[in-house]
Image (cartoon, grey):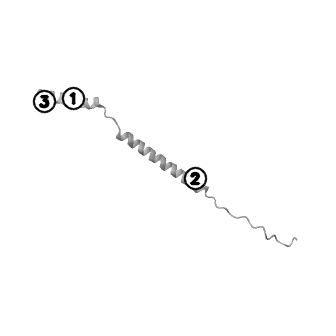
Amino acid sequence: MNNETLRDIKPLLEISDSSYYLYIGFLIFVGLFLFGLLFFLLRKFWFNRKVNIQKVYFERLKGVNWEDTKQSAYDITY
């Protein structure tokens, strides 16, 4: 029996490990998702900024020509 080799036992097979690629893919997906979310939030806040009316009126008041009183009165009241 020592001279006989066992014929029914096969050597170990190498099983491919794809968890590394799944992890990298998951990180790329999460990164793209967070980048997109940040992009749309910043875009939303950028386009929905409110104008400070008080500053606008103050700048208009600074730009009035006070030499022509009639025109300056029209500019102020409009």
Which quarter of the rendered picture does the C terminus lie within? top left
- Expressed as whole percent of the image width and height from the top left, the position of residue 39 reads 42, 45
Query: Is 75 situated left or right of 43 in this image?
Result: left
* Helix, strand or loop status at disc 1: helix
Residue positioned 64% across, 61% down in the render: 16
Query: Is 48 situated left or right of 34 in this image?
Result: left
User: Does residue 36 sit above or below 13 in this rendering?
Assistant: above
Q: CA distance from mark 1 to mark 3?
A: 13 Å
Q: Earlier in the sequence, mark 1 or mark 3?
A: 1
Q: CA distance from mark 3 to mark 2?
A: 70 Å
- Expressed as whole percent of the image width and height from the top left, the position of residue 10 reads 75, 67
- Expressed as whole percent of the image width and height from the top left, the position of residue 59 reads 24, 31
Q: Earlier in the sequence, mark 2 or mark 1?
A: 2
Q: Considering depth in this image, is 40 or 56 the residue closer to the camera?
A: 40
Query: Is 5 situated left or right of 44 in this image?
Result: right
Q: Are marks 2 and 1 in contact (CB under 8 Å)?
A: no
Q: Quadrant of residue 70?
A: top left
* Helix, strand or loop status at disc 2: helix
User: Does residue 49 sit above or below 19 in this rendering?
Assistant: above
Residue at mark 3: 71
Q: Considering depth in this image, is 48 or 71 the residue closer to the camera?
A: 48
Residue positioned 31% across, 34% down in the render: 51
Q: Earlier in the sequence, mark 3 or mark 2?
A: 2
Q: Residues within 10 Å of mark 1 (few under 14, many from 20)?
A: some
Q: Which mark is residue 23?
A: 2
Mark 3 is on which residue type?
Gln
Query: Is 16 situated left or right of 78 in this image?
Result: right
Q: Which mark is residue 61?
A: 1
